[in-house]
Image: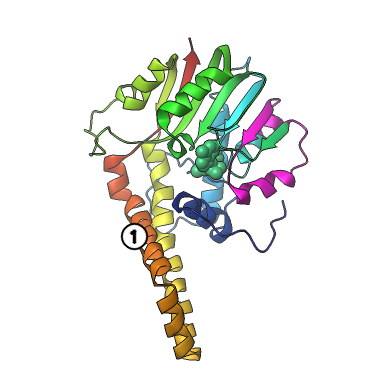
Amino acid sequence: MRISRHSPAPSTELNFELYFVTEVLKLPSLHYGYWDAGTEPDDRLDLDEMRSAQARFTERLLSFVPPEVKTILDVGAGIGDNARALARSGHRVTAISPDRNHERYFEELDEPDIVFHPSTFETFESSGSFDLILFCESHRYFDRRVGLERAAGLVRPGGYLLVSGMFQNSDEKPFPGDFEIADLPYVRMAAESGFVPLEISDITSNVVPTVAIVHRAISDFLEPALRFAEAYATARSPWKARLLRLLLSRQDKELARILRKLRRKTDPERFRERYRYATILFASR
Ligand SMILES: C[S@@+](CC[C@H](N)C(=O)[O-])C[C@H]1O[C@@H](n2cnc3c(N)ncnc32)[C@H](O)[C@@H]1O
C-alpha cells in the first residue's frame, strides 16, 4: 500500500489521534491490538510487536463473525485492515469513514469485494440491508443511541451487530473490580434497539500494552519533537518565531490541551480503572 507524503492535516481532536497513529507511528491499523494475557507494558514493547498485536486482534475479531454472514457494513472502517481481512475470508464489505485521510487507503485497494463510502454513519444511505454491522472502535464516534438505532434499521432481520471497543461507566467513574460487561449501559441501550448479546469478551488487559506504548510515544517522541522544532525556529530566527507564537497562540494552547488529554487518556493505570475494552456480538431480534 502506497501512502502519499503529504496527508491532509487532522481537523478535529479525534482525527488528531488517528492521524498520530497512521501518519506519525505509521501503524497499518487503527485499533488497539491484542496482547497475550500477562504481557506487561514495559520498555521491550516496540512498534513491530504492536503491528503483530494488531494483526492478532483482526484475526480474533473475525472469529466472532457467524459463519452464515455474507454482507458486512464496516462502520468507521479506518484504513481498511479489517475490511481487507473480511473480504479475504469471503465477505462482501461496505466500508464507511468520513476521514479524508482514510479515503485514499481505500482508493489504493484492489479489492472488488470492498466498496468504500466517504460518509458518516449518521448520513450513510443504503437501499439494501446487511447480515452484520461492524463497529470496531467506532461506536464512540457518534451518538450511541443514534448509532444503535441506525444499525437496527440497516441490519437484516435475524442479522448481527458486532461491537468491539472501549466502554466507560455511566458516570465515567472507575469500575468496581467485579463489574460485568453485561451490565454496561451500552448493552442496556442496545437491548432497547432490539439487539441481544450472544457473546461477550472482556479483553481490557489484552489491550493495555498498546495504551502504554502510545502513552510513551507521546511523552518520549512527540512532545520532545515539538519542543525541538520550537527551539530550532527560535535559534534560527528569534523574531519570526516570536511573531509565529503570537499569531498561533490559540492553536498552541489547543494543541497543548489535546496532548494533555491524550496523555491522561493513555495513562495505563487510569485506563485499567476507568475503561473496559470488550468485543460483543449481538443478534438482532
Ligand atoms: C479508531 S478508528 C477505528 C478504525 C477501524 N474500525 C479499526 O478497527 O481499525 C475510528 C473510525 O471511525 C470513523 N468515524 C469517525 N466519525 C464517524 C462517524 N460519524 N461515522 C462513521 N465513522 C466515523 C473514523 O474516521 C475512523 O475511521
In the picture shown, does residue 211 fall above or below 5? above
Image point (44%, 49%), residue name = 210
- Judge the density around disc 1: few (<14), some (14-19), many (≥20) Cα neighbours within 10 Å: few
Extreme-front residue of the structure: 247
Residue 232 at what x, y percent from top left? Answer: 48, 84
In the picture shown, does residue 128 fall above or below 84? above
Residue 214 at what x, y percent from top left? Answer: 43, 55
Q: Do we see residue 31 in this rendering?
A: no
Q: Secondary structure at mark 1?
A: helix
Residue 88 in the magenta stretch? The answer is yes
Image point (71%, 25%), residue name = 90
- Type of amino acid at the residue the image marks with label 1: Arg
Image point (47%, 28%), residue name = 147
Residue 87 in the magenta stretch? The answer is yes
Residue in front for this viewpoint, 16 or 71: 16
Q: Do we see residue 64 in this rendering?
A: yes
Whether disc 1's CB lies below 8 Å from ligand 1 is answered no
Residue stretch in magenta: 84-113
